[in-house]
Amino acid sequence: MKKKFKKILLLCRKNDKNVNKLISFFKKNSNKVILIWSKHPREKIKISKYILKNNFDYIVSFRNFYILKKNLIRRAKYASINFHPSTPDYRGMGGINFALFDNKTRYGSTAHIIDEKIDHGKIINVSRFKVKKKYSLKTLLKKTHDNMLKQAINIFSKLKENPSKLERMIIKSKNEKWVKKYTTREDMDKFYEVNKKASYKNLLRKIRAVYIEDFRPYIMLHGLKFSLSSPVKEQYSKNISKKRYKMYFDFIPKDLKDEFNKN
């Protein structure tokens, strides 16, 4: 008879294809799967008495905003596991943004035991991949979330057969260490702000690192906030030399240029 998990608690967000695939995996490999939907970062989720009275083989946080409290963490028989969309080099928010700004050539996702601190528990596995120069923020987000799904399915496929493999994975990843610095939402908002004295090259690095449909780099001037509408508007300026024009478009990733060339 094929082994299955008895009961899984999964905290995740709606309308996400990778979340849906992970839910399908757990439903196929578990006797029971309970979902807690996470809607936005500042949301306060009320955990039902039913959940707090139950025990689960594993509590899984995957693309989840909610920070687990001790009374929920201890309901896991084997472990509560989080999938962090970054390597241990970046704790908290914005790992993808900082990796692009730092011109990292490798990036990935981290599976770790959940404790009472954020992105802090024992590391189970770090799954890395190559970051190409042409990657924009949108590209790297998709690549990271796809990578995280594969990582989660790989880990839980092993744990389904033998829970003791968890400790082996932790031992195997003993050289992976979290950095001390933790990035908050306030830190990210500050990172999105462009220093008015920034060099042209650093401005382009910032655009690549933070520009996406719902988030824009900005400057503050006389108490007013000005957000970047489109990084491609510069192509219409007659005051830019050919050399500067070429530098601009060599730096902006192709998929970002294509998006705005449609307009």
Image: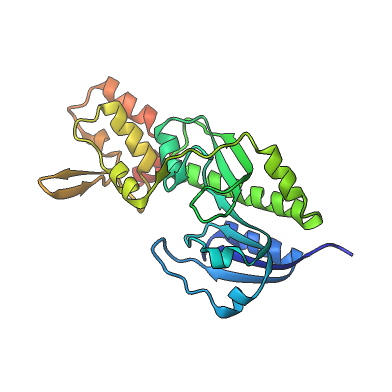
From this view, report whether residue 181 is shown above or below residue 7: above
**In this picture, is 89 found above or below 65?**
above
**Residue 1 in view in this figure:** yes
| Horizontal arrangement in the rendering, residue 206 relative to residue 88 (left or right) | left
Of 215 and 220, which appears nearest the observer?
A: 220
Image coords of residue 206 (percent x, y): 33, 36
Residue lying furthest right: 1
90 lies above or below 155:
above
Residue sticking out furthest to the top: 243
Q: Which residue reaches farthest bottom?
A: 49
Q: Is residue 76 left or right of residue 186?
A: right
Instruction: Name the colour scheme.
Output: rainbow
Percent position (x, y) of residue 225?
Answer: 18, 49
For the N terminus, give its image quadrant: bottom right
Camera sees residue 263: no
- Relative to residue 239, is residue 67 depicted above or below? below
Q: Residue at x 65, y 37 (%)?
A: 174
Q: Disc count in the image? A: 0
Residue 116: x %, y % from top left: 51, 56
In this rendered view, identify the residue nearer to me: 245 or 15.
15
